[in-house]
Protein backbone atom coordinates (compact mmCIF):
# COMPACT_ATOMS: atom_id res chain seq x y z
CA UNK A 1 0.00 0.00 0.00
CA UNK A 2 2.85 2.40 0.72
CA UNK A 3 4.41 2.01 -2.73
CA UNK A 4 1.00 2.10 -4.41
CA UNK A 5 0.40 5.50 -2.81
CA UNK A 6 3.46 6.84 -4.58
CA UNK A 7 2.22 5.71 -7.99
CA UNK A 8 -1.19 7.26 -7.34
CA UNK A 9 0.40 10.57 -6.30
CA UNK A 10 2.49 10.87 -9.46
CA UNK A 11 -0.25 9.78 -11.87
CA UNK A 12 0.35 11.78 -15.04
CA UNK A 13 -3.27 12.55 -15.87
CA UNK A 14 -3.95 13.72 -12.32
CA UNK A 15 -0.87 15.96 -12.41
CA UNK A 16 -2.06 17.59 -15.65
CA UNK A 17 -5.52 18.18 -14.20
CA UNK A 18 -3.99 19.78 -11.09
CA UNK A 19 -1.87 22.17 -13.16
CA UNK A 20 -3.99 23.02 -16.20
CA UNK A 21 -7.53 24.42 -16.37
CA UNK A 22 -9.69 26.16 -18.95
CA UNK A 23 -12.30 28.75 -18.03
CA UNK A 24 -13.90 30.22 -21.12
CA UNK A 25 -11.08 31.86 -23.08
CA UNK A 26 -8.67 31.74 -20.14
CA UNK A 27 -6.08 28.97 -19.95
CA UNK A 28 -4.56 28.62 -16.49
CA UNK A 29 -1.24 26.77 -16.38
CA UNK A 30 0.40 26.62 -12.98
CA UNK A 31 0.28 30.19 -11.70
CA UNK A 32 -0.01 31.77 -15.14
CA UNK A 33 -3.04 32.66 -17.23
CA UNK A 34 -3.00 32.73 -21.03
CA UNK A 35 -5.73 34.44 -23.04
CA UNK A 36 -6.91 32.01 -25.69
CA UNK A 37 -8.78 34.86 -27.40
CA UNK A 38 -5.39 36.35 -28.27
CA UNK A 39 -3.85 32.99 -29.20
CA UNK A 40 -3.42 31.79 -32.76
CA UNK A 41 -2.79 28.07 -32.38
CA UNK A 42 -2.78 26.12 -29.13
CA UNK A 43 -0.41 23.20 -29.71
CA UNK A 44 0.95 20.27 -27.69
CA UNK A 45 4.36 18.63 -27.96
CA UNK A 46 4.97 15.77 -25.53
CA UNK A 47 8.15 13.71 -25.16
CA UNK A 48 9.13 10.90 -22.78
CA UNK A 49 7.54 8.14 -20.74
CA UNK A 50 4.69 10.40 -19.58
CA UNK A 51 4.01 11.78 -23.05
CA UNK A 52 0.97 9.77 -24.15
CA UNK A 53 -0.83 9.98 -20.81
CA UNK A 54 -0.12 13.71 -20.54
CA UNK A 55 -1.24 14.44 -24.09
CA UNK A 56 -4.44 12.46 -23.57
CA UNK A 57 -5.22 14.46 -20.42
CA UNK A 58 -4.49 17.75 -22.20
CA UNK A 59 -6.64 16.78 -25.19
CA UNK A 60 -9.50 15.98 -22.82
CA UNK A 61 -9.15 19.28 -20.96
CA UNK A 62 -8.65 21.52 -23.97
CA UNK A 63 -11.16 19.92 -26.32
CA UNK A 64 -11.67 21.93 -29.52
CA UNK A 65 -9.37 24.69 -28.28
CA UNK A 66 -6.43 22.38 -29.03
CA UNK A 67 -5.25 22.98 -32.58
CA UNK A 68 -2.86 20.07 -33.03
CA UNK A 69 0.00 18.21 -31.43
CA UNK A 70 2.70 15.58 -31.64
CA UNK A 71 3.75 12.92 -29.10
CA UNK A 72 6.93 10.86 -28.86
CA UNK A 73 6.75 8.08 -26.29
CA UNK A 74 8.58 4.81 -25.66
CA UNK A 75 7.58 1.75 -27.65
CA UNK A 76 5.96 0.09 -24.62
CA UNK A 77 3.52 2.96 -24.10
CA UNK A 78 -0.19 2.50 -24.63
CA UNK A 79 -1.22 3.12 -28.23
CA UNK A 80 -4.28 5.32 -27.99
CA UNK A 81 -5.90 7.51 -30.66
CA UNK A 82 -5.58 11.22 -29.86
CA UNK A 83 -7.48 12.86 -32.69
CA UNK A 84 -5.42 15.67 -34.20
CA UNK A 85 -2.41 14.76 -32.05
CA UNK A 86 0.09 12.57 -33.92
CA UNK A 87 1.52 9.77 -31.76
CA UNK A 88 5.01 8.37 -32.46
CA UNK A 89 6.99 5.70 -30.61
CA UNK A 90 10.71 5.22 -30.21
CA UNK A 91 13.16 2.91 -28.49
CA UNK A 92 14.52 3.09 -24.94
CA UNK A 93 16.98 2.91 -23.16
CA UNK A 94 19.13 3.11 -26.30
CA UNK A 95 18.40 5.35 -29.31
CA UNK A 96 17.66 4.09 -32.80
CA UNK A 97 16.92 5.27 -36.31
CA UNK A 98 13.23 5.35 -35.34
CA UNK A 99 14.03 7.94 -32.66
CA UNK A 100 15.89 10.05 -35.19
CA UNK A 101 12.97 10.07 -37.62
CA UNK A 102 10.50 10.89 -34.84
CA UNK A 103 12.68 13.74 -33.60
CA UNK A 104 12.89 15.16 -37.12
CA UNK A 105 9.09 15.01 -37.24
CA UNK A 106 8.85 17.04 -34.01
CA UNK A 107 11.22 19.72 -35.29
CA UNK A 108 9.28 19.81 -38.56
CA UNK A 109 6.04 20.21 -36.60
CA UNK A 110 7.49 23.23 -34.76
CA UNK A 111 8.77 24.95 -37.91
CA UNK A 112 6.87 28.05 -38.91
CA UNK A 113 5.77 28.94 -35.39
CA UNK A 114 4.04 32.30 -35.03
CA UNK A 115 4.25 34.85 -32.21
CA UNK A 116 0.60 34.28 -31.29
CA UNK A 117 1.03 30.48 -30.99
CA UNK A 118 1.17 28.79 -27.59
CA UNK A 119 3.01 25.47 -27.34
CA UNK A 120 2.44 23.29 -24.27
CA UNK A 121 5.57 21.14 -24.15
CA UNK A 122 5.46 18.08 -21.90
CA UNK A 123 8.97 16.94 -20.95
CA UNK A 124 9.49 13.70 -19.03
CA UNK A 125 12.02 10.99 -18.30
CA UNK A 126 13.11 8.92 -21.27
CA UNK A 127 13.06 12.01 -23.45
CA UNK A 128 16.84 12.12 -23.72
CA UNK A 129 16.97 8.81 -25.55
CA UNK A 130 13.94 9.62 -27.66
CA UNK A 131 15.20 13.05 -28.79
CA UNK A 132 18.11 11.60 -30.73
CA UNK A 133 19.21 13.69 -33.68
CA UNK A 134 22.99 13.56 -34.13
CA UNK A 135 24.67 16.65 -35.57
CA UNK A 136 26.83 16.40 -38.71
CA UNK A 137 29.70 14.02 -38.07
CA UNK A 138 27.77 12.02 -35.48
CA UNK A 139 25.64 8.89 -35.65
CA UNK A 140 23.11 6.87 -33.68
CA UNK A 141 25.67 4.08 -33.42
CA UNK A 142 28.19 6.50 -31.94
CA UNK A 143 25.71 7.70 -29.34
CA UNK A 144 24.77 4.14 -28.43
CA UNK A 145 28.41 3.19 -27.96
CA UNK A 146 29.23 6.17 -25.75
CA UNK A 147 26.06 5.83 -23.68
CA UNK A 148 26.69 2.12 -23.12
CA UNK A 149 30.22 2.85 -21.92
CA UNK A 150 29.02 5.58 -19.56
CA UNK A 151 26.26 3.37 -18.13
CA UNK A 152 28.68 0.50 -17.54
CA UNK A 153 31.18 2.83 -15.89
CA UNK A 154 28.58 4.06 -13.38
CA UNK A 155 28.30 7.67 -14.58
CA UNK A 156 25.51 9.69 -12.94
CA UNK A 157 22.43 10.74 -14.89
CA UNK A 158 23.54 14.38 -14.64
CA UNK A 159 26.87 13.49 -16.24
CA UNK A 160 25.26 11.38 -18.93
CA UNK A 161 22.73 14.09 -19.77
CA UNK A 162 25.49 16.69 -19.96
CA UNK A 163 26.90 14.62 -22.81
CA UNK A 164 23.48 14.06 -24.33
CA UNK A 165 22.66 17.79 -24.37
CA UNK A 166 25.63 18.38 -26.64
CA UNK A 167 25.10 15.44 -28.99
CA UNK A 168 21.59 16.13 -30.37
CA UNK A 169 19.97 18.91 -32.37
CA UNK A 170 16.81 18.61 -30.22
CA UNK A 171 18.11 18.56 -26.62
CA UNK A 172 19.67 21.29 -24.52
CA UNK A 173 17.17 24.05 -25.37
CA UNK A 174 16.83 23.16 -29.03
CA UNK A 175 13.09 22.40 -28.90
CA UNK A 176 12.41 25.83 -27.44
CA UNK A 177 14.57 27.42 -30.12
CA UNK A 178 12.71 25.49 -32.83
CA UNK A 179 9.35 26.67 -31.44
CA UNK A 180 10.34 30.37 -31.44
CA UNK A 181 8.81 32.89 -31.76
CA UNK A 182 5.84 31.04 -30.22
CA UNK A 183 5.21 31.16 -26.50
CA UNK A 184 6.36 27.89 -24.88
CA UNK A 185 5.16 26.48 -21.57
CA UNK A 186 7.22 23.50 -20.44
CA UNK A 187 5.37 21.02 -18.23
CA UNK A 188 8.15 19.07 -16.53
CA UNK A 189 7.78 15.61 -15.01
CA UNK A 190 11.09 15.34 -13.17
CA UNK A 191 12.93 12.03 -13.00
CA UNK A 192 16.26 13.55 -11.90
CA UNK A 193 15.93 14.12 -8.14
CA UNK A 194 18.08 16.84 -6.66
CA UNK A 195 19.25 18.14 -10.02
CA UNK A 196 17.94 21.27 -11.74
CA UNK A 197 14.95 20.45 -13.95
CA UNK A 198 17.05 21.38 -16.98
CA UNK A 199 18.51 17.85 -16.77
CA UNK A 200 15.11 16.16 -17.29
CA UNK A 201 15.17 14.69 -20.82
CA UNK A 202 18.39 16.71 -21.27
CA UNK A 203 16.53 20.02 -21.04
CA UNK A 204 14.95 20.54 -24.47
CA UNK A 205 13.11 23.69 -23.27
CA UNK A 206 15.82 25.13 -20.99
CA UNK A 207 18.71 27.49 -21.58
CA UNK A 208 21.69 25.19 -21.05
CA UNK A 209 24.44 26.44 -18.74
CA UNK A 210 26.82 23.57 -19.56
CA UNK A 211 29.21 23.60 -22.51
CA UNK A 212 30.88 21.20 -24.89
CA UNK A 213 33.90 21.40 -22.62
CA UNK A 214 31.80 20.05 -19.73
CA UNK A 215 30.68 17.14 -21.92
CA UNK A 216 34.26 16.40 -22.91
CA UNK A 217 35.28 16.39 -19.25
CA UNK A 218 32.66 13.73 -18.49
CA UNK A 219 33.98 11.54 -21.29
CA UNK A 220 37.55 12.01 -20.08
CA UNK A 221 36.59 11.26 -16.46
CA UNK A 222 35.35 7.81 -17.47
CA UNK A 223 37.90 7.17 -20.21
CA UNK A 224 35.23 7.05 -22.94
CA UNK A 225 36.28 7.89 -26.49
CA UNK A 226 33.93 9.53 -29.00
CA UNK A 227 34.75 6.89 -31.61
CA UNK A 228 35.55 7.22 -35.28
CA UNK A 229 33.33 7.84 -38.27
CA UNK A 230 30.84 6.44 -39.12
CA UNK A 231 30.26 5.24 -35.52
CA UNK A 232 31.10 8.52 -33.83
CA UNK A 233 29.56 10.79 -31.20
CA UNK A 234 29.79 14.40 -32.37
CA UNK A 235 29.47 17.24 -29.85
CA UNK A 236 27.93 20.63 -30.59
CA UNK A 237 27.27 23.73 -28.50
CA UNK A 238 23.73 24.29 -27.23
CA UNK A 239 21.80 27.57 -27.79
CA UNK A 240 23.19 30.21 -25.44
CA UNK A 241 21.29 33.35 -26.51
CA UNK A 242 18.88 34.27 -23.66
CA UNK A 243 16.63 36.01 -26.20
CA UNK A 244 15.69 32.60 -27.61
CA UNK A 245 14.17 31.73 -24.23
CA UNK A 246 12.46 35.04 -23.44
CA UNK A 247 9.01 33.55 -24.12
CA UNK A 248 9.65 30.19 -22.41
CA UNK A 249 8.22 29.24 -19.01
CA UNK A 250 9.03 25.91 -17.38
CA UNK A 251 6.93 24.41 -14.56
CA UNK A 252 7.76 21.26 -12.58
CA UNK A 253 4.50 19.32 -12.11
CA UNK A 254 5.71 16.05 -10.56
CA UNK A 255 8.83 15.07 -8.64
CA UNK A 256 10.29 12.37 -6.46
CA UNK A 257 9.47 14.39 -3.34
CA UNK A 258 5.75 14.26 -4.15
CA UNK A 259 5.92 10.45 -4.21
CA UNK A 260 7.84 10.32 -0.92
CA UNK A 261 5.34 12.58 0.84
CA UNK A 262 2.46 10.37 -0.31
CA UNK A 263 4.24 7.23 0.94
CA UNK A 264 4.92 8.84 4.31
CA UNK A 265 1.23 9.66 4.75
CA UNK A 266 0.16 6.07 4.08
CA UNK A 267 2.92 4.62 6.26
CA UNK A 268 1.71 6.80 9.13
CA UNK A 269 -1.84 5.60 8.53
CA UNK A 270 -0.58 2.02 8.71
CA UNK A 271 0.96 2.81 12.12
CA UNK A 272 4.56 3.00 11.02
CA UNK A 273 6.73 5.94 12.02
CA UNK A 274 7.86 7.26 8.62
CA UNK A 275 11.16 8.99 7.94
CA UNK A 276 11.86 10.47 4.52
CA UNK A 277 15.62 10.02 4.49
CA UNK A 278 16.38 11.62 1.13
CA UNK A 279 14.91 12.51 -2.25
CA UNK A 280 18.37 12.63 -3.83
CA UNK A 281 19.74 9.15 -3.24
CA UNK A 282 22.72 8.28 -5.40
CA UNK A 283 25.74 5.98 -5.44
CA UNK A 284 26.53 2.40 -6.33
CA UNK A 285 23.42 0.22 -5.83
CA UNK A 286 25.31 -2.34 -3.73
CA UNK A 287 26.74 0.34 -1.45
CA UNK A 288 23.34 1.98 -1.06
CA UNK A 289 21.86 -1.41 -0.13
CA UNK A 290 24.32 -1.67 2.77
CA UNK A 291 23.53 1.91 3.78
CA UNK A 292 19.78 1.20 3.86
CA UNK A 293 20.27 -2.02 5.82
CA UNK A 294 22.45 -0.16 8.34
CA UNK A 295 19.82 2.55 8.69
CA UNK A 296 17.19 -0.12 9.38
CA UNK A 297 19.34 -1.83 12.01
CA UNK A 298 19.65 1.48 13.87
CA UNK A 299 15.95 2.35 13.60
CA UNK A 300 13.42 1.46 16.30
CA UNK A 301 10.77 -1.18 15.57
CA UNK A 302 7.80 0.12 13.64
CA UNK A 303 9.88 2.44 11.45
CA UNK A 304 9.38 3.07 7.72
CA UNK A 305 12.44 4.56 6.04
CA UNK A 306 11.72 6.14 2.65
CA UNK A 307 14.26 7.01 -0.03
CA UNK A 308 14.05 8.49 -3.52
CA UNK A 309 16.69 8.99 -6.16
CA UNK A 310 18.68 7.01 -8.66
CA UNK A 311 21.60 4.70 -7.98
CA UNK A 312 24.08 3.36 -10.49
CA UNK A 313 25.48 -0.07 -11.31
CA UNK A 314 29.02 -0.72 -12.43
CA UNK A 315 28.62 -3.76 -14.68
CA UNK A 316 31.31 -6.40 -14.26
CA UNK A 317 29.34 -9.57 -14.96
CA UNK A 318 27.31 -10.70 -17.96
CA UNK A 319 23.89 -11.03 -16.35
CA UNK A 320 20.69 -9.02 -16.69
CA UNK A 321 18.94 -6.60 -14.40
CA UNK A 322 18.61 -2.99 -13.33
CA UNK A 323 19.65 -0.87 -10.40
CA UNK A 324 16.47 -1.57 -8.38
CA UNK A 325 16.77 -5.35 -8.72
CA UNK A 326 20.47 -5.20 -7.90
CA UNK A 327 19.87 -3.07 -4.80
CA UNK A 328 17.24 -5.49 -3.47
CA UNK A 329 19.49 -8.47 -4.17
CA UNK A 330 22.47 -6.81 -2.47
CA UNK A 331 20.37 -5.95 0.59
CA UNK A 332 19.02 -9.48 0.98
CA UNK A 333 21.95 -10.92 2.91
CA UNK A 334 22.23 -7.92 5.24
CA UNK A 335 18.62 -7.74 6.48
CA UNK A 336 17.45 -9.05 9.84
CA UNK A 337 14.36 -11.27 9.99
CA UNK A 338 12.14 -8.35 11.03
CA UNK A 339 13.29 -6.09 8.18
CA UNK A 340 12.11 -5.62 4.60
CA UNK A 341 13.33 -3.59 1.63
CA UNK A 342 11.18 -2.85 -1.43
CA UNK A 343 12.67 -1.17 -4.51
CA UNK A 344 10.61 0.37 -7.29
CA UNK A 345 11.31 2.00 -10.65
CA UNK A 346 8.38 4.39 -10.92
CA UNK A 347 8.12 3.97 -14.69
CA UNK A 348 7.57 0.25 -14.17
CA UNK A 349 10.70 -0.83 -16.02
CA UNK A 350 13.99 -1.48 -14.24
CA UNK A 351 16.05 -2.04 -17.40
CA UNK A 352 13.55 -4.74 -18.33
CA UNK A 353 9.97 -5.79 -17.71
CA UNK A 354 10.30 -5.88 -13.90
CA UNK A 355 9.82 -2.74 -11.80
CA UNK A 356 11.77 -3.75 -8.70
CA UNK A 357 11.74 -6.38 -5.97
CA UNK A 358 11.14 -7.22 -2.32
CA UNK A 359 13.93 -8.49 -0.10
CA UNK A 360 13.15 -9.94 3.32
CA UNK A 361 13.37 -13.16 5.35
CA UNK A 362 10.76 -14.84 3.11
CA UNK A 363 12.81 -13.99 0.01
CA UNK A 364 15.88 -15.48 1.67
CA UNK A 365 14.01 -18.67 2.59
CA UNK A 366 12.62 -19.08 -0.93
CA UNK A 367 16.09 -18.55 -2.39
CA UNK A 368 17.46 -21.35 -0.22
CA UNK A 369 14.64 -23.66 -1.33
CA UNK A 370 15.34 -22.80 -4.99
CA UNK A 371 19.08 -23.32 -4.58
CA UNK A 372 19.71 -19.74 -5.73
CA UNK A 373 22.82 -18.22 -4.15
CA UNK A 374 22.32 -14.42 -3.93
CA UNK A 375 26.06 -13.75 -3.82
CA UNK A 376 26.71 -15.68 -7.03
CA UNK A 377 23.96 -13.83 -8.88
CA UNK A 378 25.24 -10.52 -7.55
CA UNK A 379 28.77 -11.26 -8.77
CA UNK A 380 27.35 -11.91 -12.25
CA UNK A 381 25.19 -8.75 -12.17
CA UNK A 382 22.30 -11.14 -12.78
CA UNK A 383 19.65 -9.79 -10.44
CA UNK A 384 16.99 -10.44 -13.09
CA UNK A 385 17.98 -14.11 -13.24
CA UNK A 386 17.79 -14.36 -9.45
CA UNK A 387 14.30 -12.93 -9.25
CA UNK A 388 13.19 -15.15 -12.11
CA UNK A 389 14.01 -18.15 -9.90
CA UNK A 390 12.84 -16.48 -6.68
CA UNK A 391 9.55 -14.76 -7.62
CA UNK A 392 9.70 -11.76 -5.30
CA UNK A 393 9.96 -9.17 -8.09
CA UNK A 394 7.42 -6.42 -8.75
CA UNK A 395 5.75 -6.31 -12.15
CA UNK A 396 3.58 -3.25 -12.75
CA UNK A 397 3.86 -2.84 -16.51
CA UNK A 398 4.60 0.64 -17.89
CA UNK A 399 3.05 3.14 -15.47
CA UNK A 400 2.95 6.19 -17.72
CA UNK A 401 4.76 8.07 -14.94
CA UNK A 402 8.42 8.52 -14.06
CA UNK A 403 10.10 10.19 -11.06
CA UNK A 404 13.17 7.93 -10.84
CA UNK A 405 13.31 5.25 -8.13
CA UNK A 406 11.85 4.68 -4.67
CA UNK A 407 12.86 2.51 -1.72
CA UNK A 408 10.64 1.47 1.16
CA UNK A 409 12.52 -0.03 4.12
CA UNK A 410 10.44 -1.40 7.00
CA UNK A 411 11.28 -2.72 10.42
CA UNK A 412 8.35 -4.51 11.95
Image: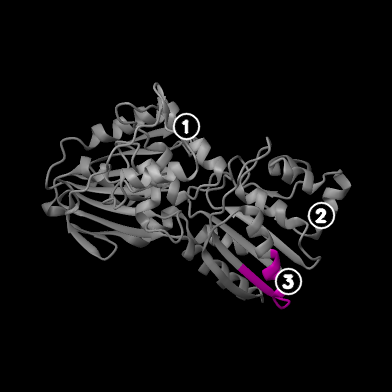
Name the mark nearer the viewer: 2 or 1.
Answer: 1
- Of residues 57 and 111, the one nearer the viewer is 111
**Which disc number belongs to residue 144?**
1
**Disc 2 secondary structure class:** helix
Q: Can residue 40 be seen in this view?
A: yes
The answer to which quarter of the image holds residue 227 is: top left
Residue 361 placement (x, y as % from top left): 81, 60
Would residue 216 appear left or right of 408 to someone viewing this image?
Answer: left
Residue 308 placement (x, y as % from top left): 54, 61
User: Of callouts 2 and 3, which one flags the residue occurring earlier in the amino acid sequence?
Assistant: 3
Q: Residue at x 66, y 64 (%)?
A: 292
Would residue 137 appear left or right of 374 to someone viewing this image?
Answer: left
- Identify residue for label 3: 297
- Residues at marks 2 and 3, CA–CA distance in whole angstroms: 17 Å
- Identify residue for label 2: 364
Residue 333 highlighted magenta (yes or no): no
- Residues at marks 3 and 1, CA–CA distance in whole angstroms: 41 Å
Magenta span of residues: 293-305
Amino acid sequence: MIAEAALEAIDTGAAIRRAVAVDGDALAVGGETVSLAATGRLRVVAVGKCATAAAAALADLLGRKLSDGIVLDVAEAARVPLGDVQVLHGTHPMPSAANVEATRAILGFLEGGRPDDVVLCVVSGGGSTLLCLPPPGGSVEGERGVLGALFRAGATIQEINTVRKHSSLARGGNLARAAAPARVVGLIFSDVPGAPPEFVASGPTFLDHRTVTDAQRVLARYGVAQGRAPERLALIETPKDPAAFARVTNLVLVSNQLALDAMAAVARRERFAPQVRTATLSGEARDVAMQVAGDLHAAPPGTALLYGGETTVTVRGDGRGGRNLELALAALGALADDELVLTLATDGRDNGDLAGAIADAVTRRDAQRAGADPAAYLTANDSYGFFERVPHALETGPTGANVADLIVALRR
